[in-house]
Image: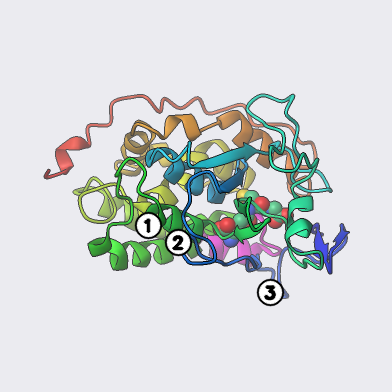
Amino acid sequence: MVNMYVDGEWKTDTYEFSNDDGEFDRSETTFRNELGTEQFPAESGRYHLYISRACPWAHGAAMVRSLMGLEDDISMDIVDPYRDDRGWQFTPQKDDCTADSISGHDYLGETYVAADPNYTGRVTVPVLWDREAETIVNNESIEVMRQFATAFEGNGTELYPEHLREEIDEVVDDIYDPINNGVYRAGFAGTQEAYENAVADLFDALDAYDERLADQRYLVGDQLTLADLRLFATLVRFDNVYHTHFKCNVRLIREYDNLWPYVRDIYQTPGIEQTMNMDHIKEHYYTTHTDINPTQFIGVGPDLDFHADHDRARLQSE
Ligand SMILES: N[C@@H](CCC(=O)N[C@@H](CS)C(=O)NCC(=O)O)C(=O)O
């Protein structure tokens, strides 16, 4: 069962995660407006981002905000990593969690029905809120990432440069199904076959990307881009969570010759580490998905050294 709104009413008994073939189905997000338009001009101080530090999709938006130095332009709140059957919640008493500084809500769901009283859909992060229009601009992570990267100038960091856009989009698309969503397809599969198919796709793609990163520092061009942030968000959670909790256990990322130094390289990029909270990541997955981890015990290991030397600058020509 999943929890979601139907016509503005919160339901806790809606439908299963998987379709008739036992495959995990991720529903489409519904708020798909664009920043930098007449309706939603890119004004400093106008927009607000809601994230969970646990969520890889929201992490992408938080990383773009941080790398571009947009903290003063776009404010941000952080939900409790544990999601109960009322959905994402604000618990400012908990470490690295905040209150809802916009509306003082207890649950993020209230923000969705404030934007649309008849809202039907899940309450997901990230959410980009417009203070002026009092509505949700967008809740689809890749769009929020692209819009931050293009609508705001920030400190000048270019994460989605025009000449690389096509290739970045291709890689983002290519990694979505087998890797970013692939770990969820494995973890929430409803049949053994669907699980095994997801794991096969996942490790085929990881092997291919490990090879691609053998002689280039980043995925596209010679610079860090949105494509790297998408891949990183999944890889950095992998050994601590997906390997065990989602049974993606053919290999660990730290066993890959190139993916593991690549993760450390991005982790050590100025602006990234402050977006990380491994305690939130572990607490969220192991305690929230009680259908796949009924004891809610949080896996202890492994203790990864994200600060170890990565020796990847040699792969960059600039
Ligand atoms: N397609 C969305 C997916 C976001 C998403 O599913 N976020 C998860 C957390 S990792 C969530 O909020 N799930 C709550 C739910 O589905 O009830 C995006 O990329 O922004």
Considering depth in this image, is 306 or 32 the residue closer to the camera?
32
Q: Taking 122 as reference, is 237 left or right?
A: left
The color scheme shown is: rainbow
Find out whether the residues at labels 1 and 2 contact each other: C-beta distance under 8 Å. yes
Q: Quadrant of residue 220?
A: bottom left
- Mark toward the viewer: 3 or 2: 2
Disc nearer the start of the sequence (3/2) = 3
Q: Which residues are magenta?
A: 187-202
Label 3 is placed on what type of residue? Asp
Residue receiving disc 1: 150
Rendered image: mark on residue 211: none
Kind of element beneath mark 1 = helix
Task: Name the N-terminal-most of marks 3 and 1.
Answer: 3
Query: What residue is pinned by disc 2?
Result: 36
Residue assigned mark 3:
21
Is residue 285 found inside the magenta-colored segment of the image?
Answer: no
